[in-house]
Amino acid sequence: MNRIDSRFDALAAAGRKGLIPFITAGDPSDAATVPVMHALVRAGADVIELGVPFSDPMADGPVIQQSSERALLRKVGLRRVLAMVAEFRQQDVATPIVLMGYLNPVEMFGLQRFAKAAVDAGVDGVLLVDCPPEESDPVREALNAEGLALVPLAAPTSTGERLTKLCRSAQGYLYYVSFNGVTGAGNKLDTGDVAQHIRHLRTLSNSRIAVGFGVRDAASAVATGELADAVVIGSALVSTLAQAADTADACARAEAFLSPIRTALG
């Protein structure tokens, strides 16, 4: 059992909802990334999704696109991201880390080489936005051979055989995208629609379900938490961090942003 499963088991036993913040590695600076990760844990993060900067993040809105662009200008690539995780693990061996990104950097690295390097660094799972279930078997095999979870994405448009395959193959947790569109698009969370979809997902899978897109503050996190096992919050946090003057300010902003959400979730 890896750290993701252990953390969700502990949350379920305590009757608590998971809180999963997303940040882009290398933003607001290379030096700030690992300290901010520790700050998020202090503020109540249960899992951290660490974004791998990519030149064409098609599922992301302007906030995360721009954070990726800034990180790439700082030469933060996949190898540097793995080094950040290894540095984080020097002080924290318990908090699950999921790398979130796109398939191209992983393929360029080499599937087997990446899987081994990721495990050696301390990564627990990988979420690849552009890796459809129909083409995911080679990726899953390479990751699973090293004990890494391949976390799938399901959207409101996922139906039929594709949705069934996504649900049955879910590892770690199933990331449900609450609306059609990109991250940070300003869409208002429709909890009734999300609830209907999650009820259907639970008929197809016993996997834990985390909901992202549209979660931006304590109120939306609580509304989502009533439906799912965990909530993912990204663009609003990334936007807050982008205003940081230095590493200390970034850490303070991370804690100030996440703490009220953790409190509201219980």
Image (tube, helix red, strand yellow):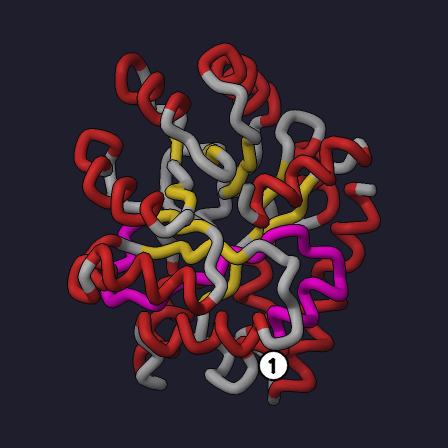
Which amino acid does the dot numbered 1 rest on?
Ala
Question: Can residue 177 be seen here?
Answer: no
Percent position (x, y) of residue 93?
Answer: 63, 64
Nearer to the camera, 91 or 164: 91
Q: Position of residue 10 (x, y in %)?
A: 73, 39
Residue at screen point 18% across, 58% down: 107
**How many marks are shown on the rendered structure?**
1
Identify the element where label 1 is drawn. loop
Residue situated in front as seen by the camera: 213 or 93: 93
- Residue 112 sits in quarter: bottom left
- In which quadrant of the rendered image does the N terminus lie? top right
| 119 within the magenta span | no
Please state, as top left, top right, bottom left or bottom right, where the C terminus lies in the image. Answer: top right
Whether residue 89 sits left or right of residue 102 in the image: it is right
Identify the residue shown where x is 68% and y is 34%. 225
Other-residue count near label 1 (Cα within 10 Å), few / some / many at <14 / 14–19 / ≥20? some
Residue 4, position as x, y percentages in the image: 57, 45
Q: Is any atom of residue 157 visible in this view?
A: yes
In magenta, the rendered stretch is 36-59
Q: Is residue 150 above or below residue 119?
A: above
From this view, report whether residue 176 is shown above or below residue 106.
above
Q: Which residue is mark 1?
A: 244
- Which corner quadrant of the image does residue 211 belong to? top right
**Could you tell whether 126 is left or right of 29 in the image?**
left
Residue occupying the point 53% across, 78% down: 87
Q: Position of residue 255 (x, y in %)?
A: 73, 68
Please identify the quarter of the rendering in which residue 78 is found. bottom left
Q: Based on the picture, tell me whether residue 43 belongs to the magenta stretch.
A: yes
User: Would you place residue 255 above or below residue 21 in this image?
Assistant: below
